[in-house]
Image (cartoon, rainbow, N blue to C red):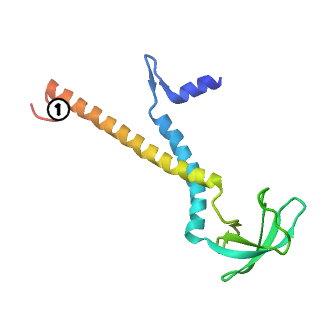
């Protein structure tokens, strides 16, 4: 069942012949582009508007979350929590460096997580693929139009021209 659905998506099934649908790879790459663009935008916000601060760890929960607070010059005292993971273990009263977005309830430990780096690479690769694929489709369409025009001119006058 899944195989038939996949074939219907990837192939234009005509009564006489089967043709590869050239827009399906473009649709896949566009979806990949959209998802990676979302994650790239999240990272870009920290690059463009992010600020750094020293935060004081207020509490460490039994599940490992570190609750911390810092003073934002625009918004005053702010609080957040983070799962430091296995690499970082914070004690209450410790000072940690964070990055945050002013006016938005978002903060994180400094540095770019690997999944954001991967999404940025995927974003630019998929952008390159989209531009390349659209250019190739455009060139193929122009070539077919030119060939059709040449065949028409060889076969006689074009439609609408006086004979």
Residue at point 64%, 71% (across, down)? 101
Tell which of 148 and 55 is nearer to you: 55
Determine whether, in the image, residue 148 is placed left or right of residue 9: left
Residue ID at (44%, 33%): 22
Instruction: Please say if 18 is above or below 96.
Output: above
Determine whether, in the image, residue 138 is placed left or right of residue 101.
Answer: left
Taking the spot 50% from the left edge, 35% from the top edge, the residue there is 24
Which residue is nearer to you in this view: 136 or 149? 136
Q: Residues within 10 Å of mark 1 (few under 14, many from 20)?
A: few
Furthest-left residue in view? 163
Image coords of residue 41 (percent x, y): 57, 59
> Is the residue 57 above or below the residue 132 in the image?
below
Q: Quadrant of residue 109?
A: bottom right
Residue located at (84% from left, 75% from top): 93
Quadrant (top left, top right, bottom left, bottom right) of the N terminus = top right
| Vertical placement of residue 18 versus 95, above or below | above
| Residue 96 higher or lower than 157, as above or below | below
Q: Looking at the figure, which quarter contains the C terminus?
A: top left
Q: Position of residue 40 (x, y in %)?
A: 57, 56
Q: Identify which residue, 22 or 52, lies in the foreground.
A: 52
Q: How many marks?
A: 1
Q: Is residue 108 left or right of residue 68?
A: left
Please give the residue where the numbered disc 1 appears in the rendered image.
158
Residue 116: give x, y in percent of width and height. Answer: 62, 55
Q: Secondary structure at mark 1?
A: loop
Q: Position of residue 17 (x, y in %)?
A: 43, 18
Instruction: Farthest residue to the top: give it.
Output: 16
């Amino acid at each position: 069942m899944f195989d038939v659905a996949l074939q219907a998506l990837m192939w234009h099934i005509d009564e006489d012949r089967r043709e590869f649908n050239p827009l399906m790879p473009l649709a896949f790459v566009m979806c990949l582009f959209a998802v990676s663009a979302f994650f790239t935008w999240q990272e870009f916000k920290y690059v463009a508007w992010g600020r750094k601060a020293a935060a004081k760890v207020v509490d460490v929960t039994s599940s490992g979350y570190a609750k911390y607070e810092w003073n934002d010059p625009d918004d005053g005292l702010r609080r957040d929590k983070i799962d430091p993971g296995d690499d970082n273990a914070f004690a209450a009263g410790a000072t940690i460096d964070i990055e945050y977005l002013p006016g938005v309830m978002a903060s994180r430990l400094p540095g770019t997580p690997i999944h954001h780096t991967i999404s940025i690479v995927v974003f630019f690769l998929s952008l390159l693929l989209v531009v390349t694929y659209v250019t190739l489709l455009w060139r193929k369409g122009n070539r077919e139009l030119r060939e059709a025009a040449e065949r028409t001119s060889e076969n006689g006058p074009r439609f609408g021209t006086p004979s």
